[in-house]
Amino acid sequence: MELKNVILEKEGHLAIVTINRPKALNALNSETLKDLDTVLEDLEKDSNVYAVILTGAGEKSFVAGADIAEMKDLNEEQGKEFGILGNNVFRRLEKLDKPVIAAVSGFALGGGCELAMSCDIRIASVKAKFGQPEAGLGITPGFGGTQRLARIVGPGKAKELIYTCDIINAEEAYRIGLVNKIVELENLIDEAKAMANKIAANAPKAVAYCKDAIDRGMQVDIDAAILIEAEDFGKCFATEDQTEGMTAFLERRAEKNFQNK
Ligand code: DAK
């Protein structure tokens, strides 16, 4: 796998994906989006990875948005191409059958905030900053920001942030439910790993079905959502890990031997 701007590391059942363009505050150019796509293809196939951490290189920035220098001179056709590439990668990330934790050190602006919102969980350092500055650049948030921010924090707060282009700190992001947890900068990756390992200790297929049920269920009415939940619940009974989990309970065994099967 040849990657230019993304680093993929694997440790036990975890994968750590680092956007690595610190000179441009990890801004997403098309090369980086293509790298991310390649990494996602690998993660989709790797049944040994149970949880993923997505972060940015350096302490200053998670991702400072889509690459403005690359976007500036795009024509209509190229703009559309860039948008499709980005949206496909973000959606692929969101639909990955493994939980993804965004570990946000510093700036998560524009496409960076949108990238973090395509993850399941966000952990922010005390230095993190979030915002959708697109309206000030003459565009709308185009990598799902209008949709995902409104779903996470509600339409009123999403509209305020998107219309004003305000940049908020970690505390405010936590207060409005945009991030799950705030930690000291130096503990960011360890805290993300601790949470990822806690998740990875549970049955991976059950976690994947939980993700599917929550994500698909949020898009439909409650009756249809309950049917999705029932479907995913049923699928668990075709897994070896369901037998293992329940057998361990009945045998009063703390150690569980989940196999992602
Ligand atoms: N793009 C390209 N380069 C960037 C960048 C970005 N988004 N953000 C920072 N950089 C570069 C700077 O140009 C600078 O490069 P050099 O001048 O050193 O070569 C370097 O990173 C360091 O940045 P600063 O010198 O500006 O650092 P400061 O500490 O002074 O400021 C900052 C940090 C994060 C406040 C500032 O860099 C900043 O405001 N950056 C831009 C943040 C922003 O507006 N982000 C939103 C980008 S718009 C689409 C879908 C989605 C999108 C677009 C299209 N379609 C569907 C087609 C998404 C759009 C966005 O994300």
Image: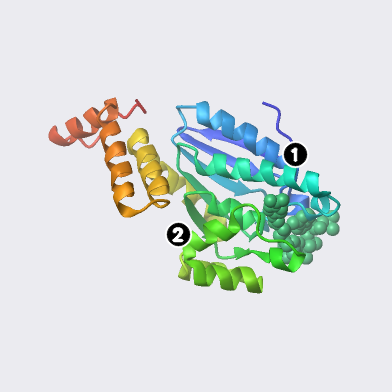
Residue 99 shown left or right of residue 105 in the figure? left
Closest to the camera, between mark 2 and mark 1, is 1
Report which quarter residue 105 is drawn in: bottom right
- Under tag 1, what secondary structure? helix
Looking at the rendered structure, the kind of residue marked 2 is: Asn
Residue 55 point in image, percent of width and height: 59, 48
| Left or right of residue 207, residue 118 in this image | right
Image coordinates for residue 166, horizontal then vertical, percent: 64, 72
Q: Position of residue 256 (x, y in %)?
A: 27, 32
Tell me: residue 71, above or below residue 257.
below
Question: Answer yes or no: do the residues labelled 2 and 1 have beta carbons within 8 Å?
Answer: no
Mark carried by residue 96:
none
Q: Quadrant of the N terminus?
A: top right
Report if residue 26 is visible in the image.
Answer: no
Where residue 104 appears, x then y in whole percent?
58, 55
- Ligand 1 within 8 Å of disc 2? The answer is no
Q: Earlier in the sequence, mark 2 or mark 1?
A: 1
Between 238 and 124, the residue placed more toward the observer is 238
Which residue was labeled with disc 1? 31
Residue flagged by tag 1: what amino acid is it?
Glu
